[in-house]
Image (cartoon, grey):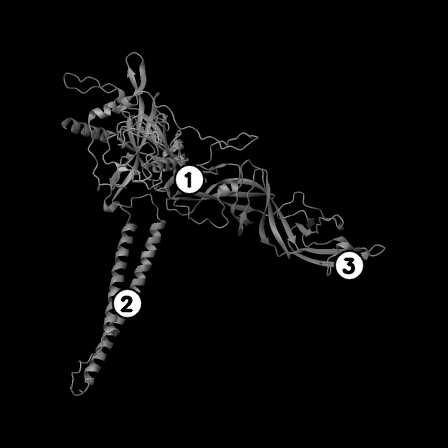
Amino acid sequence: MDDQHRTDNGKRSDEAAVPAHPSVLDSVVVHAVGAVCRRRARVALPPGGRLRLTGLPQALDGRSLRARVLSGPPGTAVTEARLEPVVELRSPDELPTLQGRLKEAREHEAAVRERHRLTLDVIAETSALRAVPPARRKDEPLRRTPADAWLELAEFVDERLARLQVRAEELTEELERAEHATETLTDQVDRSSTAGPTRPVETSATVLLTLTTPVATPDTGPDPVLAQDQDPAPEDPAGAAPAPDIAPDIAPDIDIELEYGVPAVRWVPAYRLSYQQGSDTGRLVLRASVAQRTGEDWTGVRLALSTADLDRRTDLPKLRSLRIGRSQPAPPPSGWREPPAGLGDLFTGFDAVGPRPEPRRRGPVPVTAPAPPRFAAPAAPVAPAAPGAPYAGGARPSGPHPGGTLSADEPPLPSLGFAGYGGPPPQPGSPLPPPAAAPAPVARRARSARGGTEAAGSAFADEFGGAAPSPASPTAPTPGATLLDYPSLVLAGPDEPAALRGTLHPPTETRPAPTGSPLSGLPLPRHAVPPRASAGSFDHRFDAAAPADIPSDGSWHTVTIGEIPVTVQPEYVTVPAVEEKVYGTLVLANRTAQAVLAGPVEVTVDDEFLLTAALPTLAPGGTRRLGIGVTESVEVARRTELHESTTGMLNTSTVLDHRVHVELANRLGHAVTVEVRERVPVSPDSEIRIEERADWHAPAVPSPECPPSTRLWRIDLPPGGRAELDGGYQIRIPAGKAIVGGNRRN
């Protein structure tokens, strides 16, 4: 016991001797969902090769933690990076004052609410005061009612209710003010940063690093080895301490970089477009709205935005063979593999130490049936399973068997081995292995008093997903989907029963379902589009030109990323058949190698803010049109005429002659280009002919805005100029194709 106590003290002394150094957040790459953070620390090379870095957030993903040495003596490298929580005690003055004010406001609101409730109860009791005459006895003459007493009681009740009502109104107003103060402080706390401490006792994340340090040898010089693997130098007979390889005062400095991922980060693009009339270029500034709730404030970090997804799919699709013939189900893959040799001797040293003290349990676990169990399993890691459910442990339970051997009418169960099963299934009539010592065996499935064979067969079918074998021809068991899910299997350690040590089995603990990101319900800004929805099949990265500051408050913060040069051509579009108005547009052309994602854009023309519009996705080399609203200074008017006649020797065809007349007027002080959109009918019947009589043209590339039936006019108007456009088309309909009841007119 003394040796063990000294060993524990020595371990605690070693842990306490590990130097702790702060780390500084250097850069962040924000992805579509989540971010990758990099922290840096410059520390002196520790003599023991171990150090601890602090300042990490609690929300980091430990699986993504990586560390490396950026600069230092040759041969210095990180061999292990382990995430360890450390409990920290906070004094009251270190806690944020906003939390204390909110706590006081809630206590004050609760006290006022209680006083208000008590006052209302007193009002109800006072209102219920009534004069009750005594019961009249038999043969007792009638008595006179004391009117003075009734009046005094009524005056007392009225005066008391008046005072109580005034008090209740005062408390109601005070309660409303207290509720408003509580709501205000609650909103401030919700919007405040989560980087600072909020509780007196909380845990903080630290990283324990193990380094390879260069150790000087007399012959070969510096040799990189693990510092903790060095043999301790013999002490000097005079009592002097051994000289370290690297003196503390001349220990070189090393730069260490930590990289980890955090989930609670989102970003959406936003833009600001500045355009000067008469110029063919514009200034498109990319700005990002970033929200993060990672538990640390990003102050002065190098920010980059990426459209890639951190949890992208990486498995390749499987191209299966095409077979001609009768369809047959594919055979399930085999889950059995021979266990490694010497697996039983792996835990010899662990058993030689002695048994560990059993953990304290709340109470005995009830047995599912009074009959002796056919299979038993440890009760500590698993809970009793419902009938028909697979074994939670995933392995063959060990336990006493009524006959000591497996009979031919009872199907054997496979034991879990190195990669699914521990060996081939036992043959009928072979003895069972000795039962493993378990602290509290629990019956998995009790045999029924009648139909024991049927119960065993149904248990076999429930466990391995197949039909129960007949007693005459036992078949080899087929593993279920749970046993074949190798990424989710865990390796049984030395604390497990002897029959399960070193084998793979499904996890027995029930893990809570993963919850959504704290920012999953955050509403997007107006016209904002998530980057994965607008990026399509390409991924791009945008690096910020200057350091950014983003607090961990879970709200949107706008950060300027950089400038994207675009070509801007102003055009005016009108669709007079639908609305006699002219709309101003800006045709944007992206001549760079960067994509412009969809998002809100603030349009400024001639240094005057115009509006906030929705910018569509603009791929490299693409061209899109951005609408900026109605232009009142450019007028349009449209008139139509329809002439109906018949042609042919026997009037066998009906001719519908449509004529369109459009007038345009430019009231602006500069020339404009107007695109007039019209439409013509389209008929799938070859006997119905449509003849166009205009100088318009069809769109080069049909789109949802301009379908194939669209016809376009493009005309340049000088300042104060006017223009008239005439067009039309004829529809020739045979008599047999005429619409009953008359032709449809525009």
Residue on which disc 2 sits:
170
- Residue at the outermost top position: 219
Location of residue 202 in the rendering, given as x and y in whole percent from the top left corner: 27, 42
Q: Quadrant of residue 341?
A: top left
Q: Quadrant of residue 338?
A: top left
Q: In the rendered structure, which disc, 2 or 3, sits on the residue that comes first in sequence?
A: 2
Task: Kindly identify the residue that appears in the image at 34 percent across and 56 percent down.
Answer: 184
Q: In the rendered structure, which disc, 1 or 3, sits on the residue that comes first in sequence?
A: 1
Cα gap from disc 2 to disc 1, whole angstroms: 51 Å
Location of residue 93 in the rendering, given as x and y in whole percent from the top left corner: 24, 46
Q: Amino acid at mark 3?
A: Glu
Note whether 115 is above or below 708 in the view shown: below
On residue 644, the disc is: 3
Q: Nearer the viewer, mark 1 or mark 3?
A: 3
Q: Nearer the viewer, mark 2 or mark 1?
A: 1
Task: Kindly identify the residue that appears in the image at 24 percent across and 23 percent down.
Answer: 348
Cα gap from disc 2 to disc 3, whole angstroms: 83 Å
Cα gap from disc 1 to disc 3, whole angstroms: 66 Å
Taking 7 as reference, is 651 left or right?
Answer: right
Residue on which disc 1 sits:
34
